[in-house]
Image (cartoon, grey):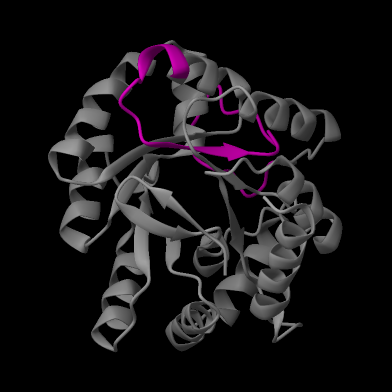
Amino acid sequence: MHYIQLGNMKVSRFILGSNPFSGFSHQGVENDWIMRHYFSSAVIKQTIRSAEALGVNTIIARTDYHMIRLLMEYWDEGGQMQWFAQTCPEVGSHEACILRAFTGGAKAVHLHGGVMDHLLAQGRLDEIPPMVDLIHQKGMLAGVAGHNTQVFEWAERHLPEVDYYMCCYYNPTDRGSHPEHVPEAEEYYLEEHRLAMTSMIKTLSKPVIHYKIMAAGRNDPQEAFVYAARHLRPRDAVCVGIFAKNKPDMVREDVELLEKALDAIKV
């Protein structure tokens, strides 16, 4: 497993994502429910353990009570993976999510990408610097996520103390009127968005966690990992969600695809 140093932490370059655990398929309402039925508590914990056995040491998970409960059980049962928390607008304010992450054992917190896109559209990004300060006051690394390249243009000017960025390869829906994901909304995964974000990443001063590299299951995995590896800078990592219902060895296959791609280009 390849690792990077992020702040004072060793972080696997393959980071386990958890959107599927909460039923966020980004492929419509029916697939959301298929994921929710598949991901029992036992299956989620087994998926995390499978990733940990391969050297993955970091998970990105939401600050909702569902994921906090599961992580608590996983740690109580001997799990060692570290949690990077994502705020989630439907369960509370920025501050409430940050404090929930802190009490739940998170090592880092980043502001939700949809929230950042929404605040950008609403001209309200001045809410964010005090939240970065709060995260640091609680002893955690601080980050911001986004689907819109303009979020990171703003962050470069206004968030000198932030520790990392979460950059989505695609900007599938408009978040101008609301920050939350809307399962019924049609989503668009355009190559021009991937090109724009990876071009932006080259210019950024902070480590980047690349996410939705497979366009929520729409891209060929091998192509997606090769593309991501070519655009990873030495301090960057990728976050990948796993839905192994029809492919039980998906965790291993995805980790090996990234490792092979990184080895081929020596990033």
Horizontal arrangement in the rendering, residue 43 relative to residue 137 (left or right): right
**Where residue 115 sits: x, y (%)?**
45, 32
* Observer-nearest of 250 and 37: 250
Quadrant assignment, res 67: bottom left
**Where residue 222 sits: x, y (%)?**
84, 62
Assign the magenta stretch its main secondary structure.
loop
> Which quadrant is the N terminus positioned in?
bottom right
**Where residue 152 sits: x, y (%)?**
52, 22
Q: Residue at x 23, y 46 (%)?
A: 140
**In magenta stretch: residue 182:** yes
Q: Which residues are magenta?
A: 156-185
Quadrant assignment, res 219: bottom right
Horizontal arrangement in the rendering, residue 72 relative to residue 175 (left or right): left
* Observer-nearest of 181 and 220: 220
Instruction: Tell me if residue 97 can be seen.
Output: yes
**In magenta stretch: residue 90:** no
Q: Is residue 13 above or below residue 210?
A: below
Total of numbered circles in the picture? 0
Instruction: Tell me if residue 124 can be seen.
Output: no
Quadrant assignment, res 146: top right
Q: Residue at x 29, y 87 (%)?
A: 78
**Where residue 179 sits: x, y (%)?**
48, 33
Horizontal arrangement in the rendering, residue 80 relative to residue 11 (left or right): left
Q: Is residue 219 above or below residue 200?
A: below
Q: Is residue 70 above or below residue 77?
A: above
Q: Is residue 95 above or below residue 130?
A: below
